[in-house]
Image (cartoon, rainbow, N blue to C red):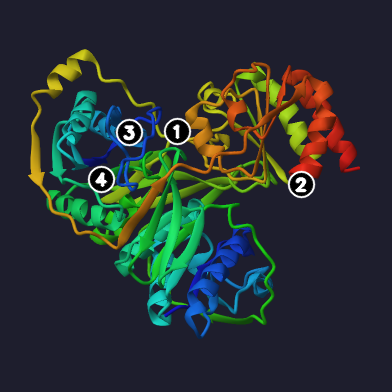
């Protein structure tokens, strides 16, 4: 009853990076749950059309067993099928907790599973612990201006982890693997395809480094400066945008950071020409390190920035790009 | 087409956040409340569907305190036909309890389409819509930014990391709406006047306590006071040094 089921994500039969974080979070929770005696296991669950690349690596992040359940119908995310398979598994395995990623898929799937099991869900959490045998979580509310601490008094405790918060940690276990075919119910909701963004483009919600631009960039073409800076970081950085420039049509909504966009928690967030409205801060204030580049010394962004540079972004950003390039040789 | 739109009364995101003396909730004194911005996309979409069909009914359903009547009136002012308030003294933290109460009401209404905002900007819960769908055994697509409906079938698009998922589903269905779906209209003065006379049914509702207990509401940890490293491009070498040696992120 203390074991934890970690629900992983794959696309095109390759495990998504956020899955390592889910296993890491699940391991942490299992260790806390098992402390009363007997320990607790982490079973990592992958649902796919066939075997999934990377699944055998999960023992390294603390999974005791990797269970791959396959059906040709699971080429794409099948909301109803996935929900049923996970809920059935959670029930059969008598798990004490089920852990998802608070990704686009996890946020869709976790409530379905919780409702099927008739237990509550704590979505998009940034911390997890066990107190007096019960799972407690922290969840940012009111645009990140307050933290809600919740106790889940039903089992299994269902949670989804905010991406990039539970940094994947190597915790090698002698993980075993098991692959089995599973029945897929005929779902009414069918994903017929995925339109891809630019190949290789990293999503702002999952990038380790996010460089966001605002109105200070003056025109859409100037985002090239941020793209060059992102490229200098060698594939770890994504370019984000403030609401103002998304509403003006300069950048896609998928890139928007803030209350009506994405919530990001990268290791490094660089805000360029962004004043720092409350709605923007809501989307990035849990970043580990924040850098602001703005010509207005009184801009609110400097209040949350660990490091600020007051100045003309058209001079500062190219210089920064040049120096980062040198650093990465 | 009969469409239900579930809306929530939430504090304006610009509002001051002060924690009440119980240490578990928001001090509502002086707080301005608004219609949850994501729900505006849902209301707008419902109105467009009705206008496009030239017939149908848009019903606004909310669960909340008596003051949520104002929130419903805002949606009625945008053009919805009538409202239902499931009046509860307190809304539990457990989204499943909210889903159960809404689900019971929605089931009785036999709607072709049930719309929610993808999340509420107060609790960031992202869950009541899909939970209602599960409880009512209805097809559900969440966080949609594009929608087409024809002949009892729908096609929606939803943003995922690095792309857009294209999803097909039959009606009746539950959908939750994201930014980008449409541009919500502002209520016109005529609409605001008309909304005052539109029917709004208040139903006292008892909710279960749920299994999510609020232990505390607290301010986020203060970020260490930031510092201005310098001015202009001359500050870049020092910035890099700090990022590398002090913050250790490079």
Q: Which residue does the numbered mark 2 point to in the structure image?
A: B248
- Measure how far apart labels 2 and 4 are at the Cα level: 51 Å
- Measure how far apart labels 4 and 1 are at the Cα level: 19 Å
Instruction: Report the mark closest to the observer, 1 or 3.
Output: 3
A33 or B195: nearer the eye? A33
**Residue at 60 percent of width and 52 percent of height:** A164
Q: How many numbered callouts?
A: 4
Can you say whether A200 is above or below A66 in the image? above
Looking at marks 4 and 1 on the same chain, the residue that comes earlier in the sequence is marked by 4
Looking at marks 2 and 1 on the same chain, the residue that comes earlier in the sequence is marked by 1
Looking at marks 1 and 3 on the same chain, the residue that comes earlier in the sequence is marked by 3
Looking at marks 3 and 4 on the same chain, the residue that comes earlier in the sequence is marked by 3
How packed mark 4 is, by other alpha carbons closer than 10 Å (few <14, some 14-19, many 20 or more), is some
**Residue at 60 percent of width and 61 percent of height:** A21
Q: Secondary structure at mark 3?
A: strand
Position of residue A228 measured from the top left corner of the image (x, y, whole percent): 77, 32
Establish whether labels 2 and 4 are both on one chain: yes
Tag 1, which chain? B
Q: Which residue does the numbered mark 1 point to in the structure image?
A: B180
Quarter of the view holding residue A234: top right
Position of residue A51 measured from the top left corner of the image (x, y, whole percent): 62, 73
């Amino acid at each position: 009853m203390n074991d934890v089921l970690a629900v992983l994500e794959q696309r095109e039969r390759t495990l998504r990076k956020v899955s390592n974080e889910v296993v890491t979070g699940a391991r942490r929770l299992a260790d806390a749950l098992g402390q009363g005696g007997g320990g607790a296991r982490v079973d990592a669950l992958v649902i796919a059309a066939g075997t999934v690349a990377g699944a055998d690596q999960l023992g390294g992040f603390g999974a005791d067993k990797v269970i791959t359940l396959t059906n040709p119908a699971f080429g794409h995310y099948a909301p109803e099928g996935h929900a049923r398979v996970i809920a059935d598994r959670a029930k059969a395995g008598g798990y004490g907790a089920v852990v998802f990623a608070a990704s686009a898929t996890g946020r869709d799937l976790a409530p379905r599973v919780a409702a099927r099991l008739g237990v509550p869900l704590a979505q998009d959490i940034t911390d997890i612990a066990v107190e007096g045998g019960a799972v407690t979580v922290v969840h940012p509310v009111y645009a990140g201006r307050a933290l809600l601490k919740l106790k889940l008094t039903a089992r299994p405790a269902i949670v989804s982890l905010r991406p990039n918060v539970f940094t994947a940690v190597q915790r090698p276990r002698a993980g075993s693997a098991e692959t089995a075919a599973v029945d897929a119910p005929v779902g009414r909701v069918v994903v017929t395809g995925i339109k891809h963004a630019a190949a290789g483009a990293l999503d702002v919600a999952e990038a380790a480094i996010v460089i966001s631009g605002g109105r200070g960039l003056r025109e859409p073409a100037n985002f090239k400066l941020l793209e060059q800076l992102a490229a200098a970081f060698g594939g770890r950085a994504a370019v984000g945008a403030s609401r103002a420039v998304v509403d003006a049509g300069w950048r896609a909504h998928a890139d928007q950071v803030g209350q009506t966009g994405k919530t990001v928690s990268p290791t490094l967030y660089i805000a360029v020409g962004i004043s720092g409205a409350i709605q923007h801060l809501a989307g990035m204030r849990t970043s580990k390190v924040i850098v602001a580049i703005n010509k207005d010394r009184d801009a609110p962004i400097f209040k949350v920035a660990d490091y600020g540079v007051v100045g003309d972004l058209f001079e500062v950003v190219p210089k920064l790009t040049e120096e980062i390039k040198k650093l990465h040789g | 087409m009969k469409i239900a739109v579930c809306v929530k009364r939430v504090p304006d995101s610009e509002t001051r956040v002060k924690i009440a003396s119980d240490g578990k909730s928001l001090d509502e004194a002086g707080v301005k409340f608004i219609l949850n911005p994501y729900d505006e996309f849902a209301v707008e979409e419902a109105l467009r569907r009705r206008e496009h069909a030239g017939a149908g009914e848009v019903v606004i359903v909310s669960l909340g305190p008596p003051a949520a009547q104002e929130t419903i009136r805002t949606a009625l002012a945008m053009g919805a036909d009538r409202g239902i308030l499931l009046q509860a003294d307190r809304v539990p933290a457990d989204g499943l309890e909210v889903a159960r109460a809404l689900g019971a009401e929605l089931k009785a209404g036999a709607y072709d389409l049930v719309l929610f905002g993808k999340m509420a900007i107060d609790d960031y819960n992202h869950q009541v819509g899909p939970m209602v769908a599960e409880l009512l055994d209805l097809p559900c697509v969440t966080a949609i930014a594009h929608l087409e409906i024809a002949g009892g079938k729908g096609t929606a698009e939803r943003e995922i990391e690095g792309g857009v998922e294209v999803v097909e589903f039959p009606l009746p269905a539950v959908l939750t709406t994201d930014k980008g779906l449409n541009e919500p209209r502002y209520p016109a003065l005529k609409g605001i006047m008309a909304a005052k006379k539109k029917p709004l049914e208040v139903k006292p509702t008892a909710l279960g306590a749920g299994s999510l207990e609020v232990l505390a509401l607290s301010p986020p940890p203060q970020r260490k006071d930031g510092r201005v490293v310098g001015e202009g491009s001359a500050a870049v070498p020092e910035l890099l040094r700090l990022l590398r040696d002090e913050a250790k992120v490079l």
